Image (tube, rainbow, N blue to C red):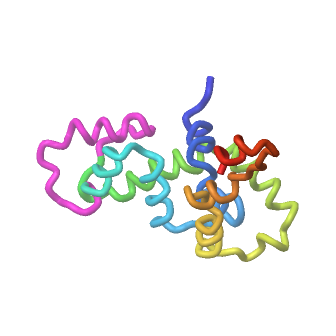
Amino acid sequence: MVELSEVVLEVRGILPLLYIFAGNGIYTDELLLQTFSSFITETDSNLVNHLLSNTNWDGLHAEIVNLISPYGGFEVPTKGNVKQTILDLAKLNMTVIPCVPISKIKVGMDCYHLLWNGVTEHVIINLMNQYKPTHLKVIINLISYTTSDDSTLCSVEK
């Protein structure tokens, strides 16, 4: 059976948080929340943003339960501990559950210790953004062709 964390790693690629966690284990709460927000559904992400920024939770009890349950939560957060509860869910889903793939990444990173030594969160995020495939990069790099010698086909190919 394929685990959800494996699907996320395959579909979305390796997230900067995983490299940072594998490298030095130190990441910011903001990066953890940002990574978790990209991991969960858009609806759940909107709910998380609402819970973190608003004090009005009227009528949201069922939505909150539906948010925390699939991600390993056991208690409905209060307004006083909502940020810590969401951080705990994020940590569980982004670092604890995918610990095996993270440990494999760490083995590879340890082979190039001088390359990764002292690399900051900012450097990793910029590097990954620089090499993130976009439609322009993929199209330009993947289009290659040769024209045939047949004049009829050559005009069609052009």
Foreground of the two, 64 or 123: 123
Find the residue positioned furthest to the right: 111
Residue 117 percent across, percent down from the top left: 77, 73
Find the residue positioned furthest to the top: 1
Q: From the viewer's perspective, is residue 29 above or below residue 72? A: below
Foreground of the two, 15 or 107: 15
Q: Which residue is pictured at 85% across the width and 65% down the height?
A: 112
Q: Is residue 57 magenta?
A: yes
Residue 98 percent across, percent down from the top left: 62, 43
Q: Which residue is pictured at 74% across the width and 45% down the height?
A: 151
Along the horizontal axis of the image, is 70 left or right of 98? Answer: left
Q: In the rendered image, which quarter is residue 81 located in?
A: bottom left
Residue 116 percent across, percent down from the top left: 77, 70
Along the horizontal axis of the image, is 100 left or right of 15? Answer: right
Foreground of the two, 36 or 42: 42
Q: In the rendered image, which quarter is residue 27 located in?
A: bottom right
- Range shown magenta: 51-76
Find the residue positioned furthest to the front: 151
Foreground of the two, 129 or 70: 129
Q: Quadrant of the N terminus?
A: top right
Q: Which residue is pictured at 45% across the width and 38% down the height?
A: 72
Along the horizontal axis of the image, is 38 left or right of 96? Answer: left
Q: In the rendered image, which quarter is residue 111 located in?
A: bottom right
Q: From the viewer's perspective, is residue 131 above or below residue 46? A: below
Q: Is residue 52 magenta?
A: yes
Q: Which residue is pictured at 70% across the width and 45% down the height?
A: 101
Q: From the viewer's perspective, is residue 122 above or below residue 77? A: below
Residue 21 percent across, percent down from the top left: 64, 60
